[in-house]
Amino acid sequence: MTRFATWNVNSLNARQERVEQWLADVSPDILVMQETKLSDDAFPALAFGALGYETAHHGEGRWNGVGILSRVGLTDVVHGFADGGDPDSDARLITARCGDLTVLDVYVPNGRALDADHYQYKLRWLERLHAHLDAVTAPGDAVLIAGDFNIAPTDADVYDPKAFEGQTHVSAPERQALGALIDRGFVDVFRTRYPDTPRVYSWWDYRRGDFHQGRGLRIDLVLATAPAASRVEWCVIDRNARKGQSPSDHAPVVVDFAAA
DNA sequence: ATGGTAGAGCATCTA
């Protein structure tokens, strides 16, 4: 069994102690993180190494930043897009082979507002994933795209769909971009396993007591190709990690895969 | 009316 997890940690500097405690509690074999907000130089590879993990990190410093921990092997690391285009100005993608899984760790742009340039950047960014997948994967591979998608796949993933009308995370073009990955053969592991379970979220705004009021979005996803999806034994969003002192605003998503 | 909180870094920007 391989235990895989994704977590937007919202600053590793602010969260290191909590992340280490969570690793001890949950013991994932692979953890992909988003929003480390670190440069590669500042990434605490030694601290994670002492816990038994190999690491890879792609970060620019103040914002964004993605990192992978693995204790089942970590090879073929690709920083950013391998689509032959211009380098992404933001550090939002890192890819690696972890054991028998090819893992894309993604921090999809937020979008900010439907009329913002950043929203067009988000759509282009999602489009670029296809050429990247063409470059780094082959048909039949067990591939995961995991991370903070900043997209709620359907209204069932939104606490109050009316409140989000006209906003990012729920717009048709974003959902269509996610749909294009589904059309490509990826499945949303959590929703496939729990098709009818309502009010399960992975992110809650820090403000207004949203977490305790149950006002959240399910925007942290694990997408898997069939060779990986067929091995899913268990999937959970760890709400407990959103509780207590100084939590991230996101909860981790954990997936157990049976041995190939 | 455009809040409220958190993080980075020290004025706001991002989420």
Image: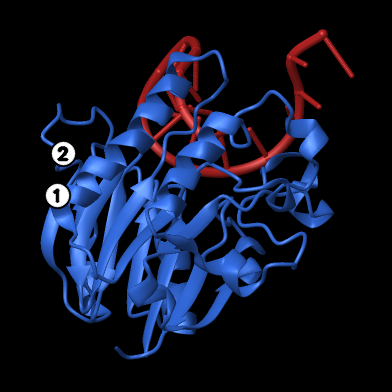
Q: Is residue B13 left or right of residue A213?
A: left
Q: Position of residue A231 (x, y in %)?
A: 41, 83
Q: Chain A drawn in what color? A: blue
Q: Tell me the residue at 52%/64% (across/down).
A: A252
Q: Amino acid at mark 2?
A: Asp
- Residue type at tag 1: Ala
Secondary structure category for the residue under label 1? helix
Whether residue A155 is situated above or below residue B2 in the rendered picture:
below
Q: Nearer the viewer, residue A47 or A96?
A: A96
> What whole-number distance in Å separates the C-alpha atoms at marks 1 and 2?
7 Å
Direction from residue A50 to residue A166 in the image, left or right: right
Res A83 label: 2
Examine the rendering and report whether any part of residue A148 can be seen. yes
| Residue identifier under label 1 | A135
Q: Colour of chain B?
A: red
Quarter occupied by the N terminus of chain A: bottom left
Q: Disc 1: which chain?
A: A
Secondary-structure class at tag 2: loop
Q: Is residue A238 left or right of residue A2?
A: right
Residue at image x 61%, y 46%? A152
